[in-house]
Image (spheres, helix red, strand yellow):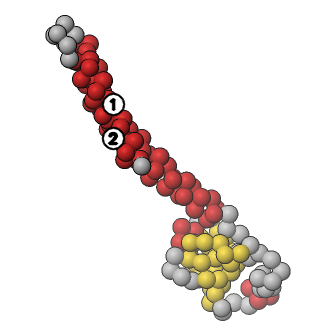
Amino acid sequence: MLFNKLMVLTSAAESIADAATSGDGATDTPASCLGGGIMSFLPFILIIGVFYFLMIRPEKKRSKAAQDMRNSVAVGNLVTTIGGITGSVTAVDGDMVTIRSGSTDVVVQKWAIRSIDAAPTAENFTYTDEELDAD
């Protein structure tokens, strides 16, 4: 559907350019040639606009959403890393996050967190200060 619209716009631009340069030769001035040159670039400008709105802009939105998610990591969140490690966040220090998975603490960078699976609640935040200090 989008391709069809582009083809219609392209043919319309070509017919306008042809109409501007056709005739008895009196219209073949530099101004009319300039209009035809601009019209020949119209399809390229439209394609760039389509690429921006269909590819670049959504990717920027996804990237911003992922960055906001990583910045909102807090102690007690259940997270999954890009390597598949799932655990509870026990400490956040700048760009480093400590995750407790089972009885093992793993330190990863924030960019390695794929998703926050659950916010801290009474059910999933089961570690006490004594358990954390025992290591």
Which quadrant would residue 72 be assigned to in this image? bottom right
Q: Which mark is residue 12?
A: 1
In primary-sequence order, the first of circles 2 and 1 is 2
Against 18, residue 65 (above or below) is below
Extreme-top residue of the structure: 26
Answer few, some or many: residues within 10 Å of disc 1's Cα (few below 14, many 20 plus, some between 14 and 19).
few
Q: Where is residue 26 in the image (x, y as percent from the top left)?
A: 19, 7
Q: Does the rendering let one see residue 20?
A: yes
In front here: 43 or 127? 43
Q: Residue 7 carries which label?
A: 2
The answer to whether residue 104 is left or right of residue 75 is: left
Q: Where is residue 86 in the image (x, y as percent from the top left)?
A: 61, 83
Q: Where is residue 57 in the image (x, y as percent from the top left)?
A: 49, 49
The type of residue carrying mark 1 is Ala
Which quadrant would residue 35 be assigned to in this image? top left
The type of residue carrying mark 2 is Met
Q: Is mark 2 on a helix, strand or loop?
A: helix
- Gap in Å between the C-alphas at discs 2 and 1? 8 Å
Against 22, residue 101 (above or below) is below
Q: Do the residues labelled 2 and 1 touch (CB within 8 Å)?
A: no
Q: Which mark is residue 29?
A: none
